[in-house]
Image (tube, grey):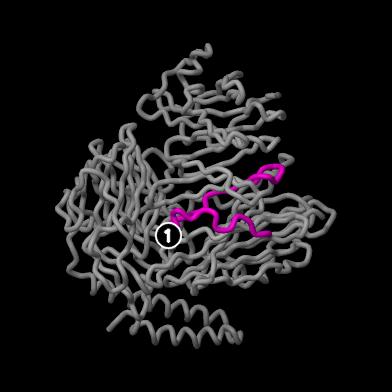
């Protein structure tokens, strides 16, 4: 009996119950009964799943995962580039790359990539939790040094007690979770609709892949984190301590669980085992009330705003008893949004405690009077992935731009809405643009009123990626979006991911970054908006970008973020050239000493982790105030600021701040009283 056949009568019953809710016949009782049926369905699924998975490979002992001879993946002497995924219903005839990531081993760059081998492409006529199409096979890890020399090949298949299934390629998330200075990465598999199970692997100094053990857990830490389906980043809360968010079905809410490295394995940080081996941090591990700082320096408690939300909203009403513990503020904007002359606050809330039976993630946009905190209006948005942008036309009317993407069993629906706040959330843009046909699109909200419009790339009727179709730019005179730069850059179709964008102050230029994630390459494109053409392409490796234009729009400071460094480079638009401050040798620990700065500490030679970030441009656009940070030999973070003269290529006004330990301060620090 298949899982789908088992669940079919259950969900037919749920349909009848849903009709009762719609007709308002004892809705609360009907919803409770629905929850019971969902639990029964989940239990039945688990029984069938465990039955089908019995007899799987045994978990290897702790230690290095031994390299093995993998069919079709013999250890190459350099980094072989494998082809695309095989067609439907065919076995894999050669390995294909699932992901790769650049890490640091003892201060030296290395590359980890994961390959699927000896697998098959499966099309399920009755889609289950893996979707209609997915890939099943063996998992191999390869590690290369910075010259692309192969350091190790490891078969990770036996580290999971079930066949490995991947629906698509994914980003590999890395971090130092046990505090030994060496990188770890996570690999996960589907466990249930509420969470995935993730194993943790570390790299030795020789580049060997080692599976780290977790006390009382044999097949991965359960996590409901949404930043990665097959690889996720854990939140570090101390030396060798991290926490994960897990959805508790009985409580109907998310709780935090923490794990600590004891030198041999990860264990619950309080020494006792919870349901899956972790400590429940719900009572003291999560801040239930946020303090919101406003521009005038005053603060507002998030609980004050949550209490004023309109609970006629059915979703908020459903979890009324849990508020304000399960709602968080993600954005706050100040202004006059509804046409009132009184100052107002536009607040975006994110609902965290939705039971799985309620469906998708939920966000709420609400307007309050700033002085009295009186509630004015609100709108709810139910989707898997929500993005918001605040826009204004030339008449000072305010609009909320919303993009939502919902994915279910391999199919996605994308929604784009422009909502007028003064007209009671009147919708001004078309919605419901799905990807079920070749002509449909996906949207990505970028900076300053730019929307990236993406089109799906298909292989055998399967969406394997997204390519840029065109951009839309907000026109404040017409209160509409104008298309610009259509299909100007397509040399790597199917692998384009929008990262960030910014328009110059005078509206003449746009900087847009793309990431070709599977090739490990990023591009920064400078567009001439007046002539609608590509001005210059820069190839830059980075995980993230930030932009700061000079007042005259002739120079752009680009912040490039990696795992252990942040670099700042300046682009001269007229000369179409890029100058890296960090790589130039003009700024830095040794360079500053040449300027006469006497540091009372030594730089950490193993992990300096330098951060260079812009604070502000000078009014004449010739100089820029920069913030710097790095790690000293005692592992304290040292930092300060300096002024960089772009024309003269010189550094001046170097200052030092007080050293601090703990997490990096990613915000640039402008010296008190600084003036140009």
Observer-nearest of 563 and 578: 578
Q: Position of residue 421 (x, y in %)?
A: 74, 62
Q: Image height check: is 273 above or below 634?
A: below
Q: Magenta segment range? A: 482-509
Q: Main secondary structure of the magenta part?
A: loop
Q: Give the camera-side residue of 612 and 204.
A: 612
Image position of 192 with respect to 559: above or below? below
Would residue 375 appear left or right of 260 to someone viewing this image?
right
The answer to whether 665 appears left or right of 174 in the picture is: right
Q: Identify whether 3 is placed above or below 363.
A: below
* Residue at 37 percent of width and 74 percent of height: 132
* Residue 486 inside the magenta-drawn segment: yes
Element under disc 1 = loop
Classify the position of the N terminus by image quarter: bottom left
Residue annotated with mark 1: 224
- x, y percentage for residue 369? 77, 55
Where residue 96 sits, quadrant-wise, is bottom left
**Horizontal side, residue 537 vs residue 301: left or right:** left
User: Residue 75's spot in the image, x, y percent?
Assistant: 19, 48
Left or right placement of residue 62 versus residue 360 in this view = left
Q: Nearer the viewer, residue 541 or 172?
A: 541
- Single out the residue that lies furthest toward the right: 341
| Quadrant in which the C terminus is drawn | top right
């Amino acid at each position: 009996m298949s899982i789908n056949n088992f669940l079919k009568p259950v969900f037919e019953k749920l349909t009848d119950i849903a009709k009762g809710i719609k007709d308002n016949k004892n809705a609360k009782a009907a919803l409770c009964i629905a929850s019971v049926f969902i639990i029964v369905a989940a239990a039945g699924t688990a029984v069938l799943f465990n039955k089908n998975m019995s007899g799987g490979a045994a978990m290897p002992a702790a230690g290095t995962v031994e390299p093995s001879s993998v069919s079709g993946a013999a250890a190459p002497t350099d980094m072989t580039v494998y082809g695309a995924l095989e067609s439907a219903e065919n076995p894999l005839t050669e390995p294909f790359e699932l992901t790769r990531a650049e890490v640091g081993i003892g201060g030296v760059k290395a590359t980890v990539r994961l390959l699927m081998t000896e697998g098959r492409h499966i099309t399920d006529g009755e889609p289950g939790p893996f979707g209609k199409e997915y890939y099943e096979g063996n998992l191999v890890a390869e590690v290369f040094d910075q010259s692309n020399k192969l350091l190790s090949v490891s078969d990770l298949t036996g580290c999971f007690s079930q066949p490995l299934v991947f629906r698509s390629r994914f980003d590999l998330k890395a971090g130092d979770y046990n505090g030994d200075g060496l990188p770890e990465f996570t690999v996960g598999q589907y466990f249930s609709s509420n969470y995935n199970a993730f194993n943790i692997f570390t790299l030795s100094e020789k580049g060997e892949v080692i599976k780290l053990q977790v006390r009382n857990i044999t097949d991965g830490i359960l996590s409901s984190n949404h930043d990665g389906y097959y690889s996720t980043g854990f939140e570090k809360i101390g030396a060798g301590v991290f926490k994960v968010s897990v959805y508790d079905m009985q409580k109907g809410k998310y709780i935090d669980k923490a794990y600590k490295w004891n030198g041999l394995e990860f264990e619950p940080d309080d020494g006792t085992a919870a349901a899956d081996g972790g400590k429940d941090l719900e009572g003291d591990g999560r801040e239930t009330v946020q303090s919101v700082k406003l521009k005038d320096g005053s603060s507002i408690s998030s609980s004050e705003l949550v209490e004023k939300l309109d609970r006629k909203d059915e979703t908020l009403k459903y979890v009324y008893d849990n508020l304000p513990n399960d709602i968080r503020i993600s954005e706050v904007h100040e202004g006059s949004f509804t046409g009132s002359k009184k100052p107002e606050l536009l607040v975006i809330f994110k609902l965290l405690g939705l039971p799985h039976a309620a469906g998708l993630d939920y966000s709420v946009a609400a307007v309050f009077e700033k002085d009295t905190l009186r509630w004015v209006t609100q709108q709810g948005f139910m989707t898997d992935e929500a993005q918001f942008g605040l826009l204004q036309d030339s008449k000072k009317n305010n609009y909320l731009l919303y993009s939502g993407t919902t994915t279910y069993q391999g199919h996605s629906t994308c929604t784009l809405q422009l909502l007028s706040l003064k007209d009671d959330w009147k919708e001004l843009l078309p919605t419901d643009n799905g990807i079920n046909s070749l002509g449909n699109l996906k949207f990505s909200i970028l900076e300053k009123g730019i929307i990236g419009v993406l089109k799906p790339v298909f292989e055998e009727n399967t969406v394997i990626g997204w390519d840029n179709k065109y951009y839309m730019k907000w026109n404040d005179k017409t209160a509409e979006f104008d298309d610009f730069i259509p299909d100007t850059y397509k040399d790597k179709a199917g692998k384009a991911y929008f990262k960030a964008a910014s328009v110059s102050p005078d509206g003449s230029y746009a900087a847009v970054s793309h990431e070709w994630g599977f090739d490990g390459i990023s591009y920064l494109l400078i567009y001439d908006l007046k002539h609608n053409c590509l001005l210059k392409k820069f190839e830059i490796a980075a995980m993230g970008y930030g932009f700061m234009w000079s007042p005259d729009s002739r120079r752009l400071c680009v912040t490039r973020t990696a795992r252990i460094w942040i670099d700042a480079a300046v682009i001269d638009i007229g000369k179409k050239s890029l100058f890296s401050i960090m790589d130039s040798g003009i700024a830095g620990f040794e360079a500053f000493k040449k300027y006469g700065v006497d540091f009372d500490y030594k730089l950490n030679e193993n992990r300096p982790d330098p951060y260079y970030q812009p604070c502000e441009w000078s009014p004449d656009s010739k100089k820029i105030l920069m913030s710097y940070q790095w790690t000293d030999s005692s592992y304290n973070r040292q930092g300060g600021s300096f002024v960089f003269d772009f024309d003269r290529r010189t550094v001046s006004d170097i200052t030092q701040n007080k050293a601090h330990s703990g997490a990096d301060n990613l915000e640039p620090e402008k010296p008190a009283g600084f003036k140009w």
